[in-house]
Image (cartoon, rainbow, N blue to C red):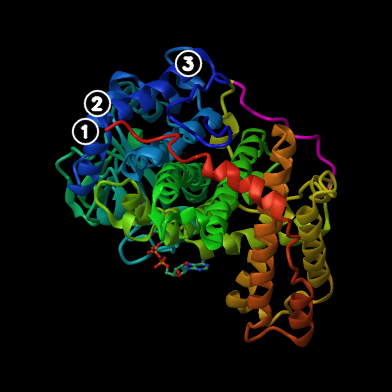
Amino acid sequence: MADPLLFNPRTYDPAHFDPETRRLLRATVDWFEDRGKRRLVEDYRSRAWLGDFLEFAARERLFATFLTPSAVAEDGNQRWDTARIAALNEILGFYGLDYWYAWQVTILGLGPVWQSGNAAARARAAGLLADGQVFAFGLSERAHGADIYSTDMLLEPDGDGGFVASGSKYYIGNGNAAGLVSVFGRRTDVEGPDGYVFFAADSRHPAYRLVKNVVDSSKYVSEFRLADYPVGPDDVLHTGRAAFDAALNTVNVGKFNLCTASIGICEHAMYEAVTHAQNRVLYGRPVTAFPHVRRELADAYVRLVGMKLFSDRAVDYFRSAGPEDRRYLLFNPMTKMKVTTEGEKVIDLMWDVIAAKGFEKDTYFAQAAVEIRSLPKLEGTVHVNLALILKFLRNHLLAPEGFEPVPTRLDAADDTFLFRQGPARGLGSIRFHDWRPAFDAYADVPNVARFREQADALCDLVRTAAPDEEQSRDLDLLLSVGQLFALVVHGQLILEQARATDLDRDVLDELFAVLVRDFSAHAVELHGKESATREQQDRALAAVRRPVTDAARSARVWERVAALSGTYEMAP
Ligand SMILES: Cc1cc2nc3c(=O)[nH]c(=O)nc-3n(C[C@H](O)[C@H](O)[C@H](O)COP(=O)(O)OP(=O)(O)OC[C@H]3O[C@@H](n4cnc5c(N)ncnc54)[C@H](O)[C@@H]3O)c2cc1C
């Protein structure tokens, strides 16, 4: 029987969506299953371009339906609906990150366009989508990495309301094929932030020179150069500070997709790993008879369930956001850095168990083991996102405010706020609802209670021994505090979603046993940091706890994991 908590193509029926969404999601699953595993793996190994998949998507109007906001929609099925976008991320991650990437950078490329007041560019983008084209997001440059302030894409005024653009971009997905590339640059005649420009380029224009794919993959992660590329007024999407805000706000929308992609990767890999381990007999017994193997697979399973619960709940905050409720700006980088690094742990745990099998070229696992690594590094590194999360620490932990409860958001609404997020400033003043009630509701679950003690210990540390002025420049120390904070937020949204979905209590308890161990490990790390004061060291160690063990509970959770064996194998 299929596990109700994991995506399984055999039983997948997203009946909670409207009929056309349901049809498209199912059609996508069927397209991959019909194509089969041999082809999927071979295309990955031979770095084949994704032409067939994009043809399928164009035929079915998949991207056009899911990525056209209702303001420019041609039919009643088109809207920007984060819940169904998340569902598609999971499916694409499940079958291969390369497919997901072509769709993901299309989302990023559309971000500056849908935020723009330029009606001609919006109409052009809608037309290209309807035509089945993909998009690209040209922000990064070879020399500048995360430092997007220092762009060398230069726009010289042409005296006629437009510009001539010259410069190069690096790491730009779909740069080989995009009908529209949103490019970030700056004017040569205006100093400082007022000089920023976001404009739309066409990868087929003669002044657009594709240099190469900088990675060895089916993903086309391009380097391209613009040489005196003409940028007409209709191509200008944003100017000045609004262009910079459009860059950050686009990344806010885009980075949300990484969590569900990593969930899809882990799910497919888990079916393979558990099925292999359960059927591998050593010394006359299945490998899964080893206690350490059971523990590793059970940890992987509950971590994956935690990733799903967190991400599902984060969708609700994302879709319910508005100018007065910007809590998504915490939950969003959390999906990015926490859920995707959890994904790495899930794969590592399973790989330790299946060992040599995970290298075999006809497995999905071999690509999962490689691709899972990229998600924490794209759309800002773990450091950058953790540093961002730290801005919310005090208000979240110590100064909660009253908010109306946010309901589950699977409704067929258009998430219009995502394209009018406004200035990217003022993060330190964002307020949050109290995190404690989510824990109080499960105070009788032993490891939730244990974890709560650790969260309270973190609050004590922040209240009485917060990093001082000098330490506030020591990002190494701060990131270590950030890891503890991220765990509290992770636990909070997991519990909110557990309640909404009536999660099995054994699974929840086992999951929190893992989080208790994680918290202890990060607390010990903080204790060892070079600049930690005596009081910080003591308070860090005071947060170390042992999870509450329960052999009967662990055995019941193990039964769920073992039952995954044989429940899914991709069609050959
Ligand atoms: C496969 C792939 C696809 C990509 N696709 C695109 C795309 O389509 N469009 C696009 O524009 N870009 C794309 N990128 C670029 C990606 O977003 C960058 O890799 C990322 O922003 C980080 O830059 P970097 O890797 O050069 O690291 P660097 O910026 O060189 O960072 C070096 C180190 O410094 C740390 N660091 C930097 N700044 C800070 C800070 N403020 N706080 C704390 N630590 C910091 C980093 O965490 C890292 O450890 C892609 C990259 C890859 C690998």
| Residue 393's disc number | none
**Is 277 in front, or is 200?**
277
In the displayed structure, 231 sits above or below 140; it is above
Of helix, strand and loop, which one carries label 1? helix
**Is 47 in front, or is 329?**
47
**Is 152 in front, or is 437?**
437
User: Do labels 2 and 1 touch, CB within 8 Å?
Assistant: yes
- Image coordinates of residue 236 in percent, x first then y, are 37, 39
Of helix, strand and loop, which one carries label 2? helix
Counting residues from the N terminus, which is met first, the one under dot 3 or under dot 2? 2
The answer to which quarter of the image holds residue 545 is: bottom right
Ligand 1 quadrant assignment:
bottom left
- Image coordinates of residue 181 in percent, x first then y, are 31, 41
Mark 3–mark 2 Cα distance, whole angstroms, equals 20 Å
Which span is picked out in magenta?
401-411
Three-letter amino acid code at the position of disc 1: Gly
Three-letter amino acid code at the position of disc 2: Glu
Main SS category, magenta section: loop
Of helix, strand and loop, which one carries label 3? loop
Which residue lies under the disc numbered 1?
51
